Amino acid sequence: MSRAAATASDAPHIPVLLRPLLAAVAPVAGHWLDGTFGAGGYTKGLLAAGADHVTGVDRDPLAFAMAAPWVADFGDKISLQEGVFSKMDAYAQDLDGIVLDLGVSSMQLDLAERGFSFMRDGPLDMRMSQDGPTAADLVNSASEADLADILFHYGEERASRRIARAILAARPLTRTLELAEAVASCLPRPKPGQSHPATRSFQALRIAVNDEYGELVGGLEAAERALKPGGLLAVVTFHSVEDRIVKRFFQHGTGGAGNANRYAPLSEGPEATWEPVTKKAVGPDEAELSENPRSRSARLRVARRTAAPPRANDPRALGAPVLPGKRR
């Protein structure tokens, strides 16, 4: 195991919203898929709650290096698959349940060499898979207009054009703190209690490097194909755009999106592919907030698969930001 993996595995991992998730999907049984295996917290929780087998999927090979010391203790109850959750239906079928925990993991944020954090100096990387173009490749090659679009659409950054100009002026950028300083240099100094000026920019670039919104829509559709009728999908999100996509996906699948014109006659839409389990998003309680402050923005939504055939979705209809000139 690498020094990075050893360091990350030494830190305690607290799965976000595990208790309400297990309560919402109880009783747990059969074959589950953990589409964001990470440090294995959800997988261990599902097995302890009664799952017969969990397939753990992750695009980050570090996750499996970290799991090596303990995963054998579970015998044939865990199988690991390196890959993206948008292809989960190729890894397993007729699943009883699927769990997705979106966004960057704590272990990735805490390792400076992964390049996700503006608080630690490291290479400007941000790749969850450790493969393909890095954030440095992106910021050093993209045009000012393309950078501004990424910052605006993926980070909801209102000063996107100003920041894009500052990035171009500071190029080449190879370190996280270099990028953070370039962004901060063109923005007002934050007031006490406000987030770091580079927060939205780092989020936007990370989303672009890892195609997170494309992966999310593809993953939700793959879950629809992989679950057996009655199977459960539980998704934990960490910011409003992710939660909006998941909410609308379930709304469209349950037929709850409604008519655009209330005076128009009701039209019979496609057969419902989902039944809601949680009526609204579930957040952390006070006990969890005290145990794990990073859970503050987390939201959980759960739905049950019907027997209706799966269907494709328009990312725009789900509220997924799509860059100009990009279809999905």
Image: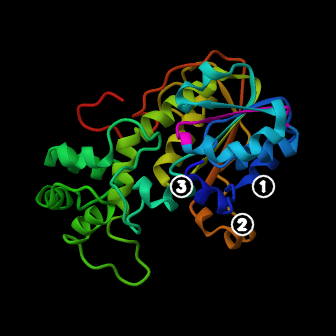
**Which quarter of the figure has residue 122?**
bottom left
CB within 8 Å, label 2 to label 1: yes
Point out the stretch of residues depicted in magenta: 51-61
* Circle on res. 19: 1
Q: Position of residue 76 (x, y in %)?
A: 82, 30
**Which quarter of the figure has residue 260?**
top left
Q: Position of residue 258 (x, y in %)?
A: 54, 34
Looking at the rendered structure, the secondary structure element under dot 3 is: helix
Relative to 57, 112 lies left or right: left
* Residue designated by label 2: 288
Q: Earlier in the sequence, mark 2 or mark 1?
A: 1
310 inside magenta stretch: no
Look at discs 3 and 1 and give the one toward the viewer. Answer: 3
Q: Earlier in the sequence, mark 3 or mark 2?
A: 3
Query: Which residue occupies the extreme top position in the image?
Result: 309
| Whole-number angstrom distance, CA of label 3 to CA of label 2 | 27 Å
Residue plotted at (55% across, 39% down): 61
* Circle on res. 4: 3
Q: Earlier in the sequence, mark 3 or mark 1?
A: 3
Question: How many neighbours does mark 3 have within 10 angstroms: few (below 14), some (14-19), or many (20 or more)?
Answer: some
